[in-house]
Amino acid sequence: MAKGDPGAGPRGRRAAPRSRKAVTGDPELVQLLTPEGARIDSVTGPDGVEYRVDFTDEEYRGLYRDLVLVRKLDAEATALQRQGELGIWASLLGQEAAQVGSGRALRTQDMAFPTYREHGVLYCRGIDPIMPLGLFRGVDQGGWDPNEFKFNMYTIVIGAQTLHATGYAMGVAMDGKTGTDDGEAVIAYFGDGATSQGDVNESFVWAGVFNAPLVFFCQNNQYAISEPLERQTRIPLYRRSAGFGFPGIRVDGNDVLATYAVTRHALDNARHGQGPSLIEAYTYRMGAHTTSDDPTRYRIASEVEAWQAKDPIARMKAFLEREKIADAGFFTEIDEQARREAVDLRERVLAMPNPEPTTLFDHVYPNGSPLLDEQRAQFSRYLESFEGSAH
Amino acid sequence: MATETLTLGKALNTGLRRALENDPKVVIMGEDVGKLGGVFRITDGLQKDFGDQRVIDTPLAESGIIGTAVGLAIRGYRPVCEIQFDGFVYPAYDQIVSQVAKMHYRSRGKLNIPMVIRIPFGGGIGAVEHHSESPEAYFAHTAGLKVVSCANPQDAYVMIQQAIASDDPIVFLEPKRRYWEKGQVDLDAPISEAYPLHSARVARAGADVTLLAYGPMVRTCLDAATAAAEDGRELEIIDLRTLSPLDLGVVYESVRRTGRAVVVHEAPSNVGLGAEIAARITEECFYSLESPVLRVAGFDTPYPAARVEEEYLPDLDRVLDAVDRTFGW
């Protein structure tokens, strides 16, 4: 080649121009309920598995009740934040189906590791909905017992809990609690942004290598605060699992029935000793990341409206009406129940006391620390030095 | 009494074996800890005898080692994690300080993370970079962690068992340059009564100056005391053993008696353990002091290339020079 030829030498080599746009719009998602509320009896996923649900009318109505209640409680929490009663709130608006579908697919013995937005899963685990509000109000750091409810504490550092879930699942296998119908499974919740984290990728490696009885449940709500999915990945997220040696599947995260079916299948695989899998629940965060950001700065109204048409509650209601599983009286009754529970939640949040100052020294170490004891004693004396102090 | 002469490394190995025997929930995990027995052979033979579910060879991912151990601990296991070298702990730093240290507090005591994180630390073995660091201050600064370091085979044998038996998460710093030093080990020493895990010990009594050290520098200070004795000076050497929380009662008692104190560590002096100890002594023993508390430490540089590490590391001469200076006030 002649000197000056743009093709000469390594420096002159030109790669074919590559699209900078990520390929994320894979249409293959499992769906059992269309946005219009039409029921699909069964669907064969791209994994060859036939997904279906077989609920009684009462169970269908129960799922609807769950969806409405968690949305109402979430809205109440948002309102409480706006009124200054909570420091911040991470709303689940739009993600009710992904959380209720997966949460109801869990069996009593299964263990869940959430992020900080899984209020719907928390509700499904039977935990009092006031529990996470203590964290966001700043009076505690989440008050439930993870072992009692099989639902770990909220984890704020992105992706860190996926490793905890993996280790816990390894322990389940080491305890010999897999391989039967009543075996245990573990589920790890995280978002699309978390898939960029090292910990999530390490947990994929570990779960695969140790065949951990674990379901990775990614709620792809399209945004990590303001960063869109294209800033996290070039490929659909569910395909990540292939590189780690376990199955991945995408489900319509606004479809509570499909989310339930896919999660139950993956959990059963895990409990029977067939190892981990990744579920990408394709959904949308309708509100802000938290009450601290303004989503109108980073996304357009038409996108939000398009997702509004896929609303998880509206489609379930349309289905119940279409199939005559519920009547107007039922819907009124659910709305009234939601209203009552929201009022109750509000009253209890307002009554949440601040912790006593010296409790900040409690539970630093299981075995205590002499230096900390000394510091606590000094601080107590300092508080007592104020005239008229109640301390 | 079953007393044997063991290297510090073998004493650790024996202590780990004892812990595995005594509690079926103890699991050892790390890179190369199985068939190889660890790069320093501290876990030699353990996987062969206890199986690959008790002594787990892990993928090469430090955050993964610590993060999965958190999950195992929540499940009821007692993980003992090996970080291969001090300079490799940083990828796991987030899991250690944000998760391991805070789980108990965050859950208001409902979760315990009874984990031991073993780290061979410090220099003096002629290694390449990232293999000779002293990261103790990072961990001692973090509430919720306890940080300890052994300095001789007897302590290695007892303290590793105490750390594993403790419900507190513990960073266990092993002085790698002392792995091959031998000493008498009482194999029947009880782990609960011999002394509490968090207790300093007078390694050598003396009346003139108190030297405070831990891990690899305890030997250096003992050698300095031998040399000083020839000049007629009695150095008292305190092996701190526990860096967080510090066992300060022993320290204050000694300094009030000698009136002089020198803190010796390999880590850089800037914002190191020596600064904390000097401040505490100054607050508590101010009227007993004949001179300021001095520090002998690594320099405030990255750990240097092996051919100059002897210049970097505090040695007998630098320790004795500091002792001399305490008499200059």
Image (spheres, coloured by chain):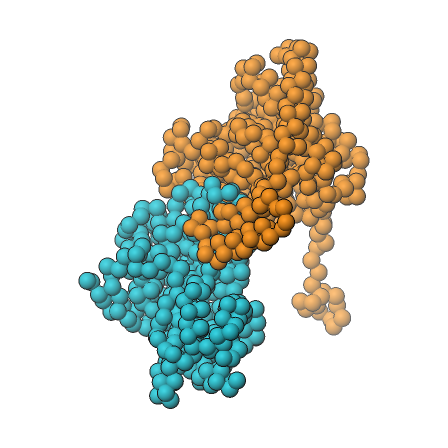
Give residue A84's quadrant in the image: top right
Q: Nearer the viewer, residue A102 or A155?
A: A155
Point out residue B179 in the picture as x, y percentages from the top left corner. Answer: 35, 69
Point out residue A15 in the picture as x, y percentages from the top left corner. Answer: 69, 58
Q: In the orientation shown, which residue stands out farthest toward the front? A: A387
Can residue B253 be spotted in the picture? yes
Left or right relative to B207: residue A68: right
Residue under the point 69% across and 63% down: A13
Q: Nearer the viewer, residue A70 or B48?
A: A70
Q: Is residue B121 above or below residue A381?
A: below
- For chain A, give the colour: orange
Q: Which chain is cyan?
A: B
Can residue B64 be spotted in the picture? no
Q: How many marks?
A: 0
Left or right relative to B111: residue B3: left
| Quadrant placement of the N terminus of chain B | bottom left
Q: Is residue B229 above or below residue A1?
A: below
Q: Nearer the viewer, residue B200 or B25?
A: B200
Residue under the point 41% across and 72% down: B254
Point out residue B96 in the picture as x, y percentages from the top left corner. Answer: 51, 54
Point out residue A310 in the picture as x, y percentages from the top left corner. Answer: 70, 27
Left or right relative to A59: residue A174: left
Give residue B118's quadrant in the image: bottom left
